[in-house]
Amino acid sequence: MWRDLAKQAASRKTKLLSQSLFSSPSSTPLKFSQEPSFLEKSRHFYARACRNYGSSLVGLRQVGVTSSQKDELSRPSPTYHSGFSGFCKGYASSAEAIASTDEDSGSEEIQEMLEDLVRESKAQSHLRQPKRVVNGMGVGKYAILRKRQIKLETEAWEEAAKEYQELLADMCEQKLAPNLPYIKTLFLGWFEPLRDAIAAEPATWASKRQHCRPSHAPFFEHLPADKMAVITMHKLMGLLMTNSGGAGAVKVVQAACAIGEALENEVKIHRFLEKTKKKSIAIKKPEAESDTMTNEQEIPTKEQEQEKLAKEQEQEKLTKEQRLRKKVTKLLKMKKLQRVKEIVKEQDDLKPWGQEAHVKVGCRLIQLFMETAYIQPSVDQLGDAPPDIRPAFVHSLKTITKDGQKTNRRYGVIECDPLVHKGMEKTARHMVIPYMPMLVPPLNWTGYDKGAYLFLPSYVMRTHGAKQQRQVVKSTPRKQLEPVYEALNILGSTKWRINKRVLGVVDRIWASGGCLADLVDREDVSLPEEPDTEDEAEIRKWKWKLKAAKKKNSERHSQRCDTELKLAVARKMKDEEGFYYPHNLDFRGRAYPMHPYLNHLGSDMCRGILEFAEGRCLGKSGLHWLKIHLANLYAGGVDKLSYDDRVAFTENHVDEIFDCADRPLEGRRWWLGAEDPFQCLAACINLTEALRSPSPETTISYMPVHQDGSCNGLQHYAALGRDKLGAAAVNLVGGEKPADVYSGIAARVLDIMRTDAEKDPASNPNALHARLLINEVDRKLVKQTVMTSVYGVTYIGARDQIKKRLKERGTIADDTALFAASCYAARTTLTALGEMFEAARSIMSWLGDCAKVIAAENHPVRWTTPLGLPVVQPYRQLGRHLIKTSLQVLTLQRETDKVMGKRQRTAFPPNFVHSLDGSHMMMTALACKKAGLNFAGVHDSYWTHASDIDEMNRILREKFVELYEAPILENLLESFQESFPTINFPSLPDRGDFDLRQVLGSTYFFN
């Protein structure tokens, strides 16, 4: 009887399970995934059930998990039902099944497990969808970084103002001054009075009629007073830190322009944000609808975003103009002229401010700052004397002599108090630094002012106010500029990060006083004491020494401020996974990062701190190139050896390299002997990691490895002139080891000097100079002059370069003798250059003659680079325009219609060659991108991962040959003749028969 009861109970349980799981009218069919994780989960589910109910293996086989039945798992089927039936039959006995649990609890547990299974199935289904990627990163991550980037660009000034306000509020509440760094305490003390003065400014002209108000009045109404105060303080202090004209002083016109321009940029961002805020409120979607938006809808791709924004702006512009025209026409018919004037004024506010407005509003803000900013020595300096409270900044007139110019000019300058100047070097970390490296890839360039930063004003070319160049670029068809835009986009898309180990070493050296690894000494040189004598010669000598010491201290101050700014950026970016440098062009077509401080165009310290964010396995080739790279960075003649000898040099110094990596400052410090010490240290760390690895070739390397042109300007001239002699001197032709043009010129200079030294000094005054210099001539003495000769260095420039080198050595103490010897050495070096590079000289002369006849007709020289970029030389005579401001009458320089003939002629040869090396770099960047390489370029220095150097070397040689296989000079002459049909141009210079294809096999062309 009990058997019958057990059978009935089992039957009822089976029926109930079947109904509850599959037969409920309200339930929807369940679909199960065929993914392995799902099958594993289902097995786990059945195993749990079997443990609870004592299932046998027979029941599991009937579930339908066998290979022949896997396809049936994706939908409800009779097989699945029979599986559950078989599963229930699989108990050891019906009585055991009944005893295991009661009917309801068993059903609930199975239902819970099934719900878990369905949830897992949904999760697996979601994971199977392809991951959405934006700019090489996940949608969510990109959204977070983009949000941070927008905040960095749009809220920097606001955040600074907010910080000062919060500190002031804390001071009021706690009645205690916060423990802040010295310079931040000053900022906090200046902020409130300046903000209040700016806020009160409109009241001073409120009662006056419109035409009686000061000309700067309209510009005070666009931004909150606290934001204007922060911009004024930070901009002025930033200029005082970085100004090269003298420590703690800046020209009024320079400061006023910078402050006015910063205000206008912030006004544009402020207006845009206010406008989009209103727009987003007006078109806000219902909550339910917004909740259902997918990540794909929320985060469009960069290209979609740009295209949509451009279309919206264009459409909005058209509709707005149409509405405005209609409204004005209607008001004019109704004779409501006052309303029309108001509309016109409103439109005028949206126009660019211009330089005149910049200086007027900038001068008024500087004036308010000077009136409200005071400084007081610390208590211990005062003693029993009354408090010495004095202005922190003063306005004065100063006579300034520009380098290389004989005339002096008086300028209005803003000078800071010595106490402010003292704390300035530690200001950088508290400064608002605009145009920081970007956290997300820059916007692609699509127009003159469309690209790079998301909100900060960005222009594809740095025209420095040259209207004609700006208009030409704006009017050039986008299709023509597409290769240039694409190359800039590639340079901007390279992801960087901070090398924390190198930064740590830099920080330690800097904290201990600098003066190591080419870092500037953080202490000033002591000033010479005034001699206690009436001897005029001694007093004159003391004055010269005092002047030199003060100049040295001024230079050190500027260098310390510059280092602090670079380190401030590095510290801010060190915890970021990666960042990007948007690039733009100078007028010649050379690419530069838009961030001004910490970038790969900077000093050895900057380059040592930076590395690629993406790492790549070294491989056999990469390990080889990393060893060569380290030897190149150590230099000191090692970089002039063959590749095999450079590798041998590195391998012979493995112990020193390991020591550098392990104990950079406590060990033998071998890396400090390198010409590029911080980059050498980074290479030592990377190479140590590889060599200590069980498999060196699989080591991931983040280090950029460089390939530099050999006196690249002369390489371009040799290719233009098909000059065999010049080509061999600058490695366009292959050789067993690299040719060194600087050593070649130095050898020729030495030959000339030896000949002159044998002459009679009475009849030939050069004999004395030759004898004085004969032991000083080496490649370092002539290198800078040779390098810049192709870029138009003059005799005066060459003299100053050589004088600087000789002064560094200190072998000629007398200043008069030093000057005379420098003059002789400069003439001799330029003579040797003319002999060795005759073809280059003839092309330079031809280019100069063409520019001369064009400028004679009062036209600027203009040409189009091989990549389609139009170039217009900006050298025009400047007119003076007087502007009356609240601070002083300022003289603004403005372009006139008259070109500068001499400057057009002398600048054209170097500018033309710069446009060609810029084209070569961009052509290489485009090809490297197609080949899947990471690429960075510094004019004639190309960077990529060690493992990709061979591929980049092949590409850059092919692109150089491709560039010069085109008839560049013929095309240039033809464009001149088309533009100026009435001018007779000189015929093209004779050229040689050098075979450009030899470059493809030249090992040391770039090395």
Image (cartoon, rainbow, N blue to C red):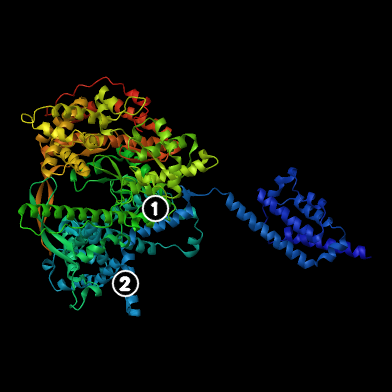
Figure quadrant of residue 970: top left
Q: Quadrant of the C terminus?
A: top left
Name of the residue lying farthest toward the top: 993
Are discs 1 and 2 less than 8 Å apart at CB? Answer: no
Of residues 672 and 951, the one nearer the viewer is 672
Q: What is the secondary structure assignment of the residue under circle 2?
A: helix
Query: In this view of the protein, can residue 36 be seen by the observer?
Result: yes
Question: Residue at label 1?
Answer: 505
Residue at point 18%, 24% (across, down): 988
Single out the mark in the foreground, 1 or 2: 1
Residue at point 8%, 31% (across, down): 761
Question: Residue 293 at what x, y percent from top left?
Answer: 49, 57
Question: Residue at label 2?
Answer: 165
Q: Quadrant of the N terminus?
A: bottom right
Circle 1 crowding by C-alpha within 10 Å: few under 14, some 14–19, many from 20: some
Amino acid at pointer 1: Val
Side of 984 relative to 307 (left or right) = left
Q: What is the secondary structure assignment of the residue under circle 1?
A: helix
Question: Residue 693 at what x, y percent from top left?
Answer: 53, 42
Residue at point 16%, 66% (across, down): 367
Question: Residue 742 at what x, y percent from top left?
Answer: 26, 32
Figure quadrant of residue 6: bottom right
Question: Residue 109 at what x, y percent from top left?
Answer: 73, 64
Q: CA distance from mark 1 to mark 2?
A: 36 Å
